[in-house]
Image (cartoon, rainbow, N blue to C red):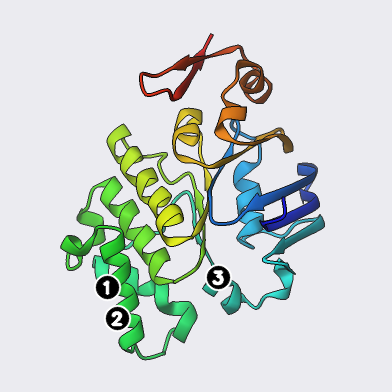
Amino acid sequence: MTDALFRIRGLCVDVPGRRLIHGIDLDLPGRQMVALIGHNGSSKSTLLKVLARQIAHSAGSVAFAGRAITDYSARDYARRLAFMPQTTPPAEGMTVRELVALGRYPWHGALGRFGPDDHAAVDGAMAECGVVAFADQLVDTLSGGERQRCWLAMMVAQQAGTLLLDEPISALDIAHQVEVLSLVRRMCHDQGRTAIVVLHEVNMAARFCDHVVAMKAGRLALQGSPDELMRPEALEHVYGLPMQVLLRGDGGRVAVPA
């Protein structure tokens, strides 16, 4: 893959007494929406946290935009890449505008004064994510889907070209799942961003993502297009049970247990 944004070679991640990721080689494309899928315990979230520099790898190498991720300063990396954990921290007493403004931290630090560029970045991020109407509301009073859009707006205000999202739809109902993933897809296709998203729901991955990486027991099981994933033999290899693939009326594919 000549346009790889991340190049991963021989990657291993260890914790005391156990290896979580076993020597994987992987290229992840830029300017696309990429899904990381697999059953529970497959280490897909571990891989995402390595890319986000939330945890260190034990062996191998990870390069981002042609440089080892360890060569970037913390601030420079944060200006290029934004990470949303599976469980976002509490935002008690914070308005939506205040939350989104936190995305400007890598650009001026905790004591830096907001300037016109910062205000413009915050306003633009709220508009892009459709949360302007909530700007002065408390984050904790919003629905789950609305809160997720606010956190995405904070990442957009950070002006990072790469978004790493760990299970952003796991606590949402189906309508909000579609809303959030549609927004992330637009961010990639309309604004030229890259999003790498951990997902449990294989049908959502196939519907919204351009590229799919499947993990199994800390190893790479499959990577390719959604069409390459949505085949019974490929799904059985990833999930370990017989699957069948049905065609929707619009030609899309849906996987169900056989």
Q: CA distance from mark 1 to mark 3?
A: 20 Å
**Residue 109 visible:** no
Location of residue 243 (image quadrant): top right
Mark 2 or 3 closer to N-term?
Answer: 3
Residue at 46% x, 21% y: name it: 254
**Picture layout, residue 67 above or below residue 26:** below
Please report the residue visible at 30 percent of the width from the left and 70 percent of the height from the top. Answer: 124
- The reply to whether residue 234 is in sight is yes
Question: Which one is earlier in the sequence, the residue at label 1 or at label 3?
Answer: 3
Q: Which residue in the protein does label 1 denote?
A: 123
Instruction: Determine contact: label 2, label 1, CB under 8 Å.
Output: yes
Relative to 42, is 81 above or below? below
Residue 157: image location, x then y, percent: 38, 70
Judge by depth and name the residue closer to the eye, 92 or 7.
Answer: 7
- Residue 119's tag is 2
Tell me which amino acid carries mark 3.
Answer: Arg
Q: Identify the amino acid type marked 2.
A: His
Task: Residue at 73%, 74% (x, y): give it.
Answer: 71
